[in-house]
Structure formats: C-alpha cells, structure tokens
Amino acid sequence: MPESPSDPLPEILNTVYRAESGRILATLIRLLGDFDLAEDALHDAFAAALERWPQDGIPANPRAWLISTGRFKAIDALRRRARFDASLEKIAAQLETESASTISEHLEDDRLRLIFTCCHPALAPESRVALTLREICGLTTEEIARAFLTSAPTLAQRIVRAKTKIRDARIPYEVPSPEELPDRLATVLQVIYLVFNEGYTASSGTSLTRADLSAEAIRLGRLLLELLPDPELMGLLALMLLHESRRTARASPTGELILLQDQDRSLWNHVHIAEGIALVEQALTSRRFGPYTLQAAIAAVHAEAPDTTATDWPQIAALYTALAQADPSPVVELNRAVAIAMRDGPEAGLALIDAILARGELTAYHLAHSARADLCRRLGRTTEARASYERALALTQLEPERRFLQKRLQELNEANPAQ
C-alpha cells in the first residue's frame, strides 16, 4: 500500500528500532561472526521492512523477521563480494545451511555475549569503552568522540582496532564460564563505571553530553543486571544512581563547583536515592559484595543525612576501613582520612594524610593536597594551608576545580592578610 502522510509505519519502525535493534544486532553478530557485516545487515533489514511491511503487513514477530531478513541480506552481500574473493562463497553457503531455529533462540544470551566480547580484557581499555558505547549503547561515532573530547576519525580507529583484534585473535563470542566469570565481570564493571565517571566529572564536553554519557552507563548497568543478577553489579548500579542523584546540586548555574556539605539537598533526585539505597541493601544482604557495594553504602549514608552535621561519620569511617581492606589503595586511604577528620577532628585526619604523602603516594594527586589544605585551614595553620592549596592548584587541569581552589586561596588570604 502506498505510504500516506498519516502512515504510522515509520513511527512503528522507529519504535521497533529503539526497542529491538540492540538484541537484533547481538544475534546477527553471533550468526554472521563479523561486527561490520552484522551492522550492515541490521540497516539492510530495517530498509527492507520500510519497503515490504506496507505491502505485506507488519509480521507477527518483527524481531524474528528482521533477524532473518538481515541474515539473508548478509548472505546476498557475501555472494556479491564472492566474485572478487572466492572464499566468501563458502562462508555464504555455511550461513545459508545453518538451522533457522538458531536465529531467534537465546536472544538475551546474545546480548550478554556482546557485552562480554566488547569488554574483553584482550582489548585496550579505551577500545573497550568505545566499542561498548558503539555496539551496545548504539551511540554514533561522532557522539562518542564529542563526549570524550576527541576527533571522530581517532575514535573510529579505536573501534576498527577493537574489531580487528576480536577477529584476528579469534576472541570467542560467548558468555564466560562460571570459573572465568568473576574476573571477566570485573572488567565489564570497570568499563561501565569508567563511562559513568567520564560523564559525571567536569572533563567532558557540555553538561548535556556528560549527563547523556552517565545515563548510558546507568542504562547499561540496568541491562546487565536484568541479564545477570549479581550483588556487586547491584552495588555498581546503586553507586551510579546515588552519585547521579546529586548532579543538579553539585555545580552552580555558572559552573562553579559546590561541595557536598554545601549542596542544596532539596535538589537531589530522591527517586534515584530510593532505588540506590534499596539496591545497596539487597547487595549487602547477599554477603557476596565487593568494593562497588561498599562505595555505594558510603554514598547511601550521605544521601540519608538531612545535612552534613547529621551525617553518620562513624559509619562512613567504618565503611572506608572495610573498603581499604577489600580494595586497598592510597585514594581509599585518603577518603578514610577525611572521614576520620569529620569523626575525630581535623588533627586526626591530617596525621593520616601526612603519612600517605610521606610515603611518596598521592604527591601528584591534587585532591590529597586540597584535603590537606582544608584541614590545615580548620586548624588555623594558615601558611601550610596556603602552600597546600597552591600545590593542588598547580596539579589540577580542570577549570571548575581550578576556580574552586583559587576561590579558597583568595578567601584564605583575605581572612589572614598578614600571614
């Protein structure tokens, strides 16, 4: 039937694309064994639907129709190319004789396969991120490049290298075995959290781009949790939701940083907070949680407090102690020192920070010097505070943080002009 201005088919196809393209692509990659061929097949299948469905009607199972059509479009493409490369005819013949029953089975397993393949540890970390955003989240190369402040050609090359590595190294398109799963899942969680942090910090593009990138990480976390319920994955999703709940309150309309204790808590997203706290509690109950869940528990304690003075600092310090045992690092020690300063006073926290810096750790980390400066300021040690603020300022490259530190240094100098 001819398409009329009121024809709902394009909108129906858009709806199907938004809802099903990820599943369809994942299955086509399994069937065809090639990312680029599968992407072309996906687009060809939707183009065929736009042509055929007005005449034949919308099929009872649009997803299966699109997968089957994409598969045969890929076979046709291979046969056309076989005139120049005879080996492709054999591949086309193998694809054509495969059982049709394999086409639409295990669709959710295909999505898991795709996630674990894109995040395979054999790939470079930046390639894992780029490939995940492109193939699983469906972002365009240009969108990803803008979010990471790089050029589209550079980003495209990362994706090409990742696909080439998967093909040449024969990385299997499969869900890891139960024995491999813990380590492989840890890599996936690292990729998701890296994407979230890139969107949450002030280092990437416009605020809209950053928010969109964090939203993609949360969406990916939700998808993975649906496919693979895991306590530490619950913890990661909770952590992202609890951080995201503070997005609108952590900067002024002019882009100035607002510290947690100074934020307007009425601006926090309490739907995110409720969901995050529920996930934390569920993960903790399992007793099979890890560092992400402990970080989420700390964020939950902050979220539950009506203001800074009502914050349960003893609980936060205890959680940081547990985190330092589960995932020891100087940064965790630094955060624990700040919590202890809030619990026991600035002198106790300062002693811990000085011990970290004396070991030669975090000497190039601006937040360590910024935290030290704040504790020295609270103790009235103005000269030391000034030196630490200046050191922090010299180490940070992010403009919002530079402005914040400059403001703190100016306030210190104005309050103590003779020192």
Image: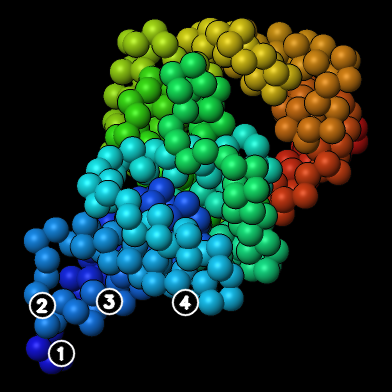
**Marks 4 and 2, the one that precedes in the sequence:** 2
Amino acid at the residue labelled 2? Asp
User: Viewed as shown, does residue 405 lie left or right of 55?
Assistant: right
Image quarter hosting the C terminus:
top right
* Residue 333 appearing in the image: yes
242 or 415: nearer the eye? 242
| Position of residue 160 measured from the top left corner of the image (x, y, whole percent) | 63, 59
Location of mark 2 (residue): 56
**Quick check: 330 above or below 208?**
above
The nearer-to-camera label among 4 and 1 is 4
Give the CA distance from mark 1 to mark 3: 15 Å
* Whether residue 377 is visible: no
Q: Pointer 1: what residue?
A: 3
Please provide percent x and percent y for residue 99: 27, 49
Q: Residues within 10 Å of mark 2 (few under 14, many from 20)?
A: few
| Image quadrant assignment for residue 383 | top right
Find the distance from the CA under tag 3 to the CA under tag 2: 11 Å
Q: Is residue 168 above or below residue 157?
A: above
Give me the residue at 52% from left, 38% from top: 172
Q: Name the mark on residue 80.
A: 4
Spatial CA span between label 4 and label 1: 31 Å
Where residue 410 sits in the image (x, y, percent)?
78, 45
Tell me if residue 325 comes above or below residue 48 in the rendering.
above
Colour scheme in the image?
A: rainbow
